[in-house]
Image (tube, coloured by chain):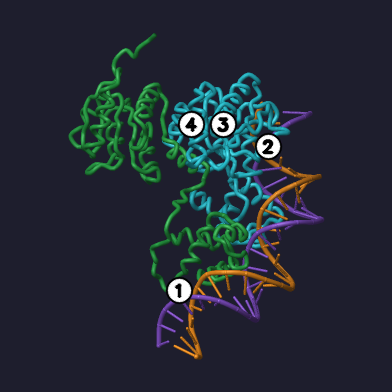
Chain colours: A green, B cyan, C orange, D purple
Amino acid sequence: MTQLPAPVRVAIVEDHGAYRNVLSEIIEATPGLRLLGAFGAIEGSLDSLADADIVLMDIGLPGLSGIEGVALVKKRNSAVKVIMVTNHSDDERVFQAIAAGADGYLLKKTSTTKILEAITETMRGGATMAPFIARRVLDVLQGRGTPAEGSPALPAGGEGALSAREREVLTLLVEGMNYREIAEKIFISPDTVRNHIRNIYEKLHVHSRSEAVVKAIRQKLV
Amino acid sequence: MTQLPAPVRVAIVEDHGAYRNVLSEIIEATPGLRLLGAFGAIEGSLDSLADADIVLMDIGLPGLSGIEGVALVKKRNSAVKVIMVTNHSDDERVFQAIAAGADGYLLKKTSTTKILEAITETMRGGATMAPFIARRVLDVLQGRGTPAEGSPALPAGGEGALSAREREVLTLLVEGMNYREIAEKIFISPDTVRNHIRNIYEKLHVHSRSEAVVKAIRQKLV
DNA sequence: GAGAGAATGACCCATTTGCGCTATTGATAC
DNA sequence: GTATCAATAGCGCAAATGGGTCATTCTCTC
C-alpha cells in the first residue's frame, strides 16, 4: 500500500475558539495529517497559511474575511487548497468564495468524518461541497436564482403599498405558479387569486404577469 | 416514532445489465426505499420515471441519452429528482446534464453507502456531487477550465445557450411586450416570435413568460 | 351604527399564451 | 453532398390570462 509520502499540512482559520479547538483535535488525531497552526484571524497567519497544503477557512472572520483570506493565500501560493467552512448554506458569500478560488465548501455541522474525507478528496484533486451548498451551486448553474424563502415581515411602508396577502401572492407569481397552483398553495379559490392579482396589477400599474414579476424583482418587492 | 409516510420511490435507468442489477439490489435492500423499476433505456420507461421520487440515470445510454432523459423526465414531472451516474468525471456531458436539470452527479465507482447518502440528501432538498465532478464545476465557476467544446455555454460563462435573436426577443419579453408587439418591433411575424419564445422556454427549462423573465433577470441574461 | 378596506368568491367573455405539428430558406459543419 | 441548425412562417387547439361586474364577510375606524 502506498502511503502519502509526507503528512498533509493543515492550517485552520476560525475565530470561534471552541470550534477551532474541535477542528484542531480532529486534525491532530488523524494519521497522515499534521496541524500547522490554528488561527483566529487572517492577519498574522498568512505566512503559515501559504505554507500549508490545506487550509480550513471560516468564511465569517473579523477583520479580513474568509473570502479575502482565500484570495490572499492563493496569491501567495496557488498550490494551497482552501476549504471554506460556513454556518449557513444560504450564505451569499458562497459564490464570492468560489470566485476567489475556494476548493471546497463545508457546513459547520458537517461530521468529522466528512471533513476528513473532504481533505483527502481535495488533496487528490477533487472538491467537496456539502449537499446544501451543491444544491445552490446547481441552482445557479441552472439559472434558478435564489428563492430565499421566508418572511414578508418587513412592511416596506410605501404608500399604495401591497397588502400582506398581495405580497404573498406576488411572491408565488414570481415563482412561476399559475392561478390554480397559487390557489391550492394558500387554500383560497382561483377566483380570489385572480382578484388579488388584479389588485396587484392596479397598484403596480402593470397589465400582465411578466410585467408584474419584473417590477417585483427590480424593486425587490419579493 | 414517526416513519417516513411513504417509501422513497426509486427508478433506475442503466444500460449495463450488471451495474443495473447492483443498483437494484442496493435499493431493494434498503429500508425506506422502494424500487419502482430498473430499465435499460429511456424509451418505454418514461411513465415509470415520471412517477418516481428519485431516478438514478446513467448518462451514456443507447438511443435517448441520459441528458435527454433528464429533460424528458423533468418535463413530465418536475418534482422528480434525477441523479446522474457516469463513468468519467471529465465527461463533457456533465454540464449538459446540469443544464438539463440534473439534481446530482455520481461516479460509478462511488460506494453504495455514498449512493444511499446521495438519495437521502437529494430528497431533503440538497444535491450531491462526487468530488471530481465538484472540482470541474468549481473550475468552471471560477472561469478556469472549460465546459468542454460543443456543450452549451453556461450562464456563469456569459452569453448562455440563447442565440442572439433569442436574447433579443427575451429582452422584449422582459419589457412586457406580447407576441404581436414584439413582432412589430423587430419586423417578423407573430408566429416566428412564438417560435423563438418556444425555443427560449426550452433552453431555459421554463414553461411560461413569467418564469422566463424571472430567470432572465436573475441570471442577468438581459 | 355607518363607512372603508381587506379578503373572499363567482360569472362572463375576448384575448393571449403554450404547445402540438409541419415546412422553407440560408449558413455552417462534416 | 448531406446533415444540422438558426431563423423564418404557418395552422389548430386547449388552457391560461386579463378585465368587467357583482356579492358576502370581517375588521377596523369614526
Label 4 sits on a secondary structure element that is: helix
The quarter of the displayed image where residue A115 is located: top left
The tag on residue B117 is 4
How many C-alpha atoms fall within 10 Å of the one at disc 3: few (<14), some, or many (≥20)?
A: many
The quarter of the displayed image where residue B96 is located: top right
Q: Which tag, 4 or 2, sits closer to the chain's start?
A: 2
Q: Are marks 3 and 2 on the same chain?
A: yes
Quarter containing the N terminus of chain A: top left
As measured in the structure, the alpha-carbon distance from the residue carrying label 4 to the one carrying label 2 is 23 Å
Q: Which tag, 3 or 2, sits closer to the chain's start?
A: 2
As measured in the structure, the alpha-carbon distance from the residue carrying label 3 to the one carrying label 2 is 17 Å
In the rendered image, which residue does mark 2 sit on? B48
How many C-alpha atoms fall within 10 Å of the one at disc 2: few (<14), some, or many (≥20)?
A: some
Cβ atoms at labels 1 and 4 below 8 Å apart? no
- Comparing labels 1 and 4, the label whose residue is closer to the camera: 4
Chain containing the residue with disc 4: B
Image x and y of residue D5, in percent: 66, 39
As measured in the structure, the alpha-carbon distance from the residue carrying label 4 to the one carrying label 3 is 14 Å
Cβ atoms at labels 2 and 1 below 8 Å apart? no
